Image: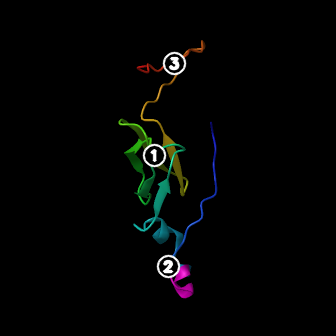
Amino acid sequence: LDQSLELEYATSESLDRRRVSILRRQDSSLLTLSFGPEGYSEVSAVPIAKPGRRLHSVRAPQSSSSNSVVVQIDAEEGNKVITLRSPLQIKNHFSVPFIIYKFVKD
């Protein structure tokens, strides 16, 4: 599923200092992302200043086990693309589709 959304940010800079260059603002260590997958714990203060991949654990409220989510930050043509994804990536290079099953203990 390919989705994009506009992100709002809050700043504590005075009105005179808002004329800081975009490049300086992108390099700021103050830019963070917080998110909470539906039905799981929140991941807060993920730094988004530098491109890279970071693994975070999330937990369902009544579950004793945790799951993982990858925050992938790519820089493309002066823009940052932030992708939240599974740590497992499967790419089908064949023309025949296949089905993937997940084993769940009862």
Which corner quadrant holds the C terminus? top left
Q: Position of residue 88 (x, y in %)?
A: 43, 30
In the rendered structure, does residue 14 fall within the stretch colored magenta?
Answer: yes
Magenta-tinted stretch: 13-18
Residue neighbourhood size for the residue with mark 2, other residues' Cα within 10 Å, grouped as few (<14), some (14–19), many (≥20): few
User: Could you say which disc has been placed on residue 72 in the image?
Assistant: 1
Colour logic = rainbow
Which corner quadrant holds the N terminus? top right
Query: Disc 1 or disc 3, which is closer to the eye?
Result: 3
The amino acid on which the numbered mark 2 sits, given as a three-letter code, is Ser
| Dominant secondary structure, magenta | helix
Asked whether the residues under the numbered discs 2 and 1 touch, taking CB atoms below 8 Å apart as contact, a structural biologist would say no
CA distance separating discs 2 and 1: 27 Å
CA distance separating discs 1 and 3: 23 Å
Residue neighbourhood size for the residue with mark 1, other residues' Cα within 10 Å, grouped as few (<14), some (14–19), many (≥20): some
Farthest bottom residue? 16
Q: Earlier in the sequence, mark 2 or mark 1?
A: 2
The amino acid on which the numbered mark 1 sits, given as a three-letter code, is Gln
Residue at 40% x, 48% y: name it. Answer: 52
Asked whether the residues under the numbered discs 3 and 2 touch, taking CB atoms below 8 Å apart as contact, a structural biologist would say no
SS at circle 2 = loop
Q: Nearer the viewer, residue 10 or 102?
A: 102
Residue at 44% x, 21% y: name it. Answer: 104
SS at circle 3 = loop
Q: Which residue is mark 3?
A: 100
The amino acid on which the numbered mark 3 sits, given as a three-letter code, is Ile
Q: Which residue is mark 2?
A: 12
